[in-house]
């Protein structure tokens, strides 16, 4: 059994999270500039077995695609072209950034540290998205 890898894509920064090989626990992997994601994923899957890419689907509260969806859609096409042998599923990513931000505040990370290290939010958002998927899959 391989891992599930979640992608919270953004043109500036992209958060990645991954499960353990048994697909029980989600953990943050890294945050990368958007243009480096495909290269990183190719290297990662050459070392680790990945059964599925989960790509966050940005939506507004009214369930319509957010303005970032145009960039996510382009990334999705590129990812499927470059790595066609790993299946890809889209998952609703609404509220993951809000939950990640609240988690970082609850962890006691100071405002200045949060400003200087926005990568934490992106990686944590991907982790929350992946953990939610795992919990949904159990049901």
Image: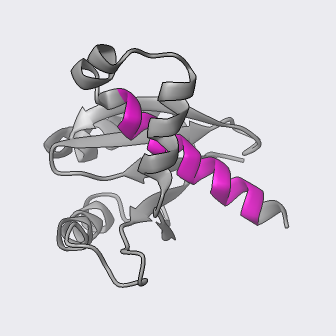
Q: Is residue 125 magenta?
A: yes
Helix, strand or loop for the magenta stretch, by majority: helix
Eyeballing the image, is 20 above or below 89?
above
Residue sitting at x 36%, y 74%:
60
Q: Is residue 36 left or right of residue 110?
A: left
Residue sitting at x 48%, y 58%:
95
Q: Is residue 72 left or right of residue 106?
A: left
Which span of residues is magenta-colored? 120-136
Identify the image quadrant of the C terminus: bottom right
Q: Is residue 91 left or right of residue 119?
A: right
The image position of residue 40, as x and y in percent, is: 30, 36
Q: Nearer the viewer, residue 81 or 72?
A: 72
Choose top left, top right, bottom left or bottom right for residue 117: top left
The image position of residue 59, as x and y in percent, is: 37, 73
Q: Is residue 72 left or right of residue 108?
A: left
Q: Is residue 25 magenta?
A: no
Q: Is residue 6 visible?
A: no
The image position of residue 57, as x and y in percent, is: 40, 68
Q: Which residue of the protein is positioned furthest toward the right in this rendering?
A: 139
Eyeballing the image, is 135 above or below 34?
below
Eyeballing the image, is 116 above or below 101?
above
Q: Nearer the viewer, residue 60 or 33?
A: 60
Eyeballing the image, is 66 above or below 5?
below
Residue sitting at x 48%, y 27%:
105
Choose top left, top right, bottom left or bottom right for residue 37: top left
Residue sitting at x 65%, y 59%:
133
Q: Is residue 55 visible?
A: yes
The image position of residue 129, as x and y in percent, is: 55, 53
């Amino acid at each position: 059994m391989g891992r599930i890898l979640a992608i919270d894509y953004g043109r500036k920064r992209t958060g990645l999270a991954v499960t353990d090989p048994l697909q029980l626990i989600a953990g943050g992997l890294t945050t990368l500039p958007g243009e480096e994601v495909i290269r990183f994923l190719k290297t990662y899957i050459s070392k680790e077995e990945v059964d599925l890419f989960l790509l966050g689907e940005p939506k507004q509260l009214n369930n319509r695609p957010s303005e970032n969806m145009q960039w996510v859609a382009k990334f999705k096409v590129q990812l499927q072209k470059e790595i066609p042998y790993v299946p890809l599923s889209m998952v609703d990513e609404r509220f993951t950034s809000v939950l990640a931000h609240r988690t970082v505040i609850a962890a006691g990370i100071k405002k200045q540290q949060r400003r200087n290290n926005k990568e934490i939010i992106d990686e944590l958002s991907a982790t929350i998205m992946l953990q939610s998927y795992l919990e949904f899959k159990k049901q």
